[in-house]
Every structure is written in structure tokens, then in C-alpha cells.
Image (cartoon, helix red, strand yellow):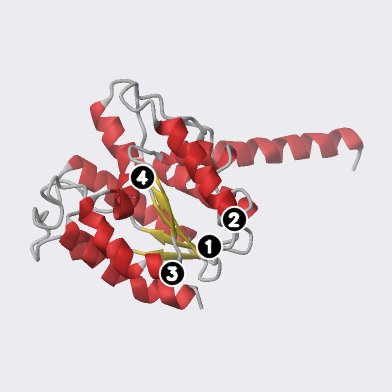
């Protein structure tokens, strides 16, 4: 095979790979730009410092407001103190984050030098929400899933010895026909295939937040998205056996 032909084959192969997962909004790192949240970068810097100061912390939760509220809101604080504080867990959740924001954080210091045994990742619902609420922002379930896949790849590079518990995106909306509920469900169908049973493990606990008929439960999700204290109790109860197993 001559060098010219070999070069064409390599170029073709790279083109095919690039075509499989093109760059788009969900897997292109970007900071939050909401003018109502100017404190976002300060929060990012604080989390970077938190990780640097606690490199041996065995457990990290990474995500958006649902994660941040574990220990930043009255709904989650007691549950965090009971379940995760004894394990010296760190909370790397930031309200409003989408997949692209988590990617930006990982590229700009978050988890630098950290070596957790386990990272619990919950992200993606704001990609759906932003698509519905903001003109010009479009993110399909496939794209959100690819954003989550990119985060998993970053975590493999930054924390190669860490396992990841990838949680299904939680249900939102009052009923199964809600467009945002349907988008999150479609994301989950894709991301569950990312689990390899060794480094990445997948867990879907979404049904535990719903009524028996599948409708949203206002007692557990008061705004059909975020969790109440009872919601966080369910959250902890449903993932703790798997967390304990993966941290052995």
C-alpha cells in the first residue's frame, strides 16, 4: 500500500468517526452565561478548591441543581448529613448546569487531582428544559446523551481509577405524555448502553418518584422536577446499596 493511499484511508476513517458524534451544543464545553447567575464561575472555582483540598475524598456527586440541593437546600441537607457526610462525600452539583457546563467545569479545574472511588453522575434534564424554554437552543435526546458520553470520557481521563454510577435522568412533568418527560426517557434509553459493568454502572430509579399510575407526585417533586425532603430520602434509599457496593 502506498503512502498516499494509506493517508486517504486514515483521513476517511477519521471523517467517519467524526461524523458519528459531531460537535454540537451538548458536547461542546461552555460556561453558564445566564445574567441572573453571575456567581456561577465563583462556584466553579470553589469546587475546584474543594477537590484540591480533599483529593482523597472517596465519593463525589456531580450534576445540576438536584445534586447541589443535597446539601445546599433544606430539602436535602438532613438526608445528606445522614447518608453522605459520614462517607466524606463531596458535592459538585451546580444549579442550572447542562452537559456542556459540566464539560467546561471538568476542563477548567473541577476534580483536578481528585481520586474518588466513585463518582455519582446525574445530568441532562436542563438540556431538555432549555430546549423547551429558550428560542435558538435545540438539543435532541441523542445530543444530550452524547453530552453525557463526553462527560464519561472526561472522567475516565481525569479520574482513571474511579468508578462511575450513571443515574438515569429523573422524570419531570405531571404525566408520561409531557414532552420533557418523553425527552428524558429517550435520553435514558441511550445512556444505559454506556454502562460496561466495570467502570461505568447505570441505575434508573425514576419510577420511585412517581405515582403507581406513572403521574408525577407533588409530594416528592413539588415542581415536577426538583425533590422534596421525602424525595431526597427516596433518592438516598434507592442508590445507597449500589453506592456501598461500588465503593467496596
Quick check: marks 1 and 2 in contact, CB under 8 Å? Answer: yes
In this rendering, the answer to whether 212 lies above or below 53 is below
186 lies left or right of 89 = left
- According to the picture, the residue beneath numbered tag 3 turns out to be 87
Q: Which residue occupies the foreground of this view, 20 or 105?
A: 105
Relative image position of residue 114 (x, y in whole percent): 59, 55
Q: Quadrant of the N terminus?
A: top right
Residue sitting at x 14%, y 45%: 223
- Can residue 232 be seen here? The reply is yes
Relative image position of residue 86 (x, y in whole percent): 40, 70
Which of the labelled discs sits on residue 57, or is there none?
A: 1
- According to the picture, the residue beneath numbered tag 2 turns out to be 114
Judge depth for marks 4 and 2 and give the one in front. 2
- In the rendered structure, which disc, 3 or 4, sits on the residue that comes first in sequence? 4
SS category of the residue bearing label 3: helix
Q: CA distance from mark 1 to mark 4?
A: 20 Å
Q: CA distance from mark 4 to mark 2?
A: 19 Å
Relative image position of residue 67 (x, y in whole percent): 34, 51
Residue sitting at x 25%, y 56%: 76
Quarter of the image for residue 87 reads bottom left
Judge depth for marks 1 and 4 and give the one in front. 1
Q: Which residue occupies the foreground of this view, 7 or 204?
A: 204
- In the rendered structure, which disc, 1 or 4, sits on the residue that comes first in sequence? 1
Which of the labelled discs sits on residue 64, or is there none?
A: 4
- In the rendered structure, which disc, 1 or 2, sits on the residue that comes first in sequence? 1
Amino acid at each position: 500500500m502506498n503512502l498516499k493511499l494509506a493517508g486517504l484511508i486514515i483521513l476517511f476513517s477519521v471523517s467517519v468517526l467524526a461524523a458519528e458524534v459531531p460537535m454540537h451544543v451538548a458536547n461542546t464545553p461552555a460556561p453558564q452565561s445566564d445574567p441572573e447567575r453571575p456567581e456561577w464561575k465563583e462556584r466553579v472555582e470553589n469546587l475546584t478548591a474543594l477537590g484540591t483540598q480533599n483529593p482523597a475524598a472517596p465519593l463525589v456527586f456531580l450534576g445540576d441543581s438536584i445534586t447541589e440541593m443535597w446539601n445546599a437546600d433544606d430539602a436535602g441537607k438532613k438526608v445528606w448529613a445522614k447518608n453522605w457526610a459520614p462517607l466524606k462525600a463531596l458535592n459538585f452539583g451546580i444549579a442550572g448546569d447542562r452537559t456542556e457546563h459540566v464539560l467546561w467545569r471538568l476542563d477548567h479545574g473541577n476534580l483536578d487531582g481528585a481520586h474518588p472511588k466513585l463518582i455519582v453522575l446525574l445530568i441532562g434534564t436542563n438540556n431538555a428544559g432549555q430546549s423547551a424554554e429558550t428560542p435558538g437552543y435545540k438539543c435532541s435526546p441523542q445530543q444530550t446523551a452524547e453530552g453525557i458520553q463526553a462527560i464519561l470520557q472526561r472522567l475516565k481521563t481525569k479520574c482513571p481509577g474511579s468508578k462511575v454510577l450513571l443515574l438515569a435522568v429523573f422524570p419531570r412533568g405531571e404525566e408520561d405524555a409531557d414532552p420533557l418527560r418523553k425527552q428524558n426517557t429517550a435520553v435514558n434509553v441511550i445512556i444505559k448502553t454506556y454502562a460496561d459493568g466495570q467502570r461505568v454502572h447505570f441505575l434508573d430509579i425514576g419510577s420511585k418518584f412517581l405515582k403507581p399510575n406513572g403521574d408525577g407526585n407533588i409530594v416528592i417533586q413539588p415542581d415536577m422536577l426538583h425533590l422534596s425532603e421525602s424525595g431526597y430520602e427516596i433518592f438516598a434509599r434507592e442508590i445507597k446499596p449500589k453506592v456501598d457496593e461500588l465503593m467496596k
